[in-house]
Amino acid sequence: MLDQIKGLHHVTSMARDARENNQFFTHKLGLRRVKKTVNFDAPDVYHLYYGDEKGTPGSVMTYFPFPNIGKGRPGVGEVGTTVFAVPKGTLGYWEKRLSDQGVANISREKSFGQDRLHFDGPDADSFALVEVADDDRAPWAEGGVPTDEAIRGFHSASLRLRDGGATEELLKFMGYQNVDTSGNVKRLAIPGGNGAETIDIETVPGASFADLGAGSVHHIAFAVENRAKQLEVRKALIDTGYHVTPVIDRDYFWAIYFRTPGGVLFEVATNEPGFDRDEDTAHLGEALKLPTQHAHLRPYLEKHLQPLGA
Ligand code: ZN
């Protein structure tokens, strides 16, 4: 069993409208946009990153806004719900705030004995807030949400699978342990993780596979401290029979990717070098940053990428 992985690093989803996406995460959820760059593999679209002040791994929600993409259709083989942690006693604040902001499909639900608030993202993405006591992660303080209520980072992500068995085995190999079961949902967690250390596996036999589109999660990334640990994880996965990509430089982290038995795309990403590698912490996310290989596209991109607004 591996011990290099500490929880989630980031969650990456698809969107339709970049401006609306930016509004939702910065104005409604009060996260900080920590990077404005492009999809390194399709540089004519943005890659937008939202998180805490520095974009700490475990807090970072990222988006590829494709202006003409169709709507995703939920199903199995994908991430079901992405869950953020908020302080104890704040769901009432959030219920009112999200309702005042016109957020769709707000509902209270119980999950593993915890109250949580479910709501839709800008493209009907499935999100929830759950109250976590004693979460010592510092929130972004200037996002318009008081620090007593602000989002601390991810709590968990759920995987919706037709058959969860092989993916559960994989997660255990990656260092996760079973902590609870509720109905058709198994909860796993990494002891001593980074706060974003919980994964739920929801098994839905016979359900249709998801169609990826706006509002769908594209992949989830797990955090390792550095490149040496990433190489250890990569070797162990390959030795177990997984097809893992070479290490790819994403400027703000190094990434490896592999497809899991249940269909979800996993990434393992390094905590180094971080989002302040090419701009000051005070100005993260403000300027359009381009990787070296796409720097020559700047005049075209500055003309054609949709302005994000304030
Ligand atoms: Zn990623």
Image (spheres, rainbow, N blue to C red):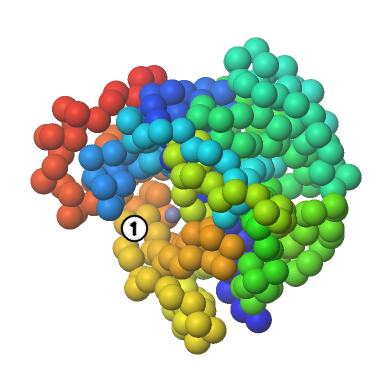
What residue type is disc 1 on? Answer: Arg
Residue 256 x/y as whole percent: 42, 67
User: Eyeballing the image, is 176 above or below 74?
Assistant: below
Residue 293 x/y as whole percent: 17, 55
What residue is at 70 percent from the left and 69 percent from the top?
165
Residue 53 x/y as whole percent: 51, 40
The residue where tag 1 is placed is: 250
Q: Which quadrant of the render holds ligand 1?
A: bottom left
Q: Residues within 10 Å of mark 1 (few under 14, many from 20)?
A: some
Q: Is residue 196 left or right of residue 64?
A: right
Q: Secondary structure at mark 1?
A: loop
User: Eyeballing the image, is 241 above or below 59?
Assistant: below
Most foreground residue, 247 or 237: 237
User: Eyeballing the image, is 213 above or below 247?
Assistant: above
- In the current view of this chain or complex, which residue is farthest to the right? 113
Most foreground residue, 183 or 131: 183
- Residue 100 lies in quadrant: top right
What residue is at 67 percent from the left and 16 percent from the top?
99
User: Which quadrant holds the C terminus?
Assistant: top left
- In the current view of this chain or complex, which residue is farthest to the top? 100
Mark 1 within 8 Å of ligand 1, using the beta carbon: yes
What residue is at 85 percent from the left and 53 percent from the top?
182
What residue is at 75 percent from the left and 39 percent from the top?
130
Residue 49 x/y as whole percent: 43, 41
User: Which quadrant holds the N terminus?
Assistant: bottom right
User: Eyeballing the image, is 34 above or below 94?
Assistant: below
Query: Can residue 197 be seen at all in this image of the molecule?
Result: no
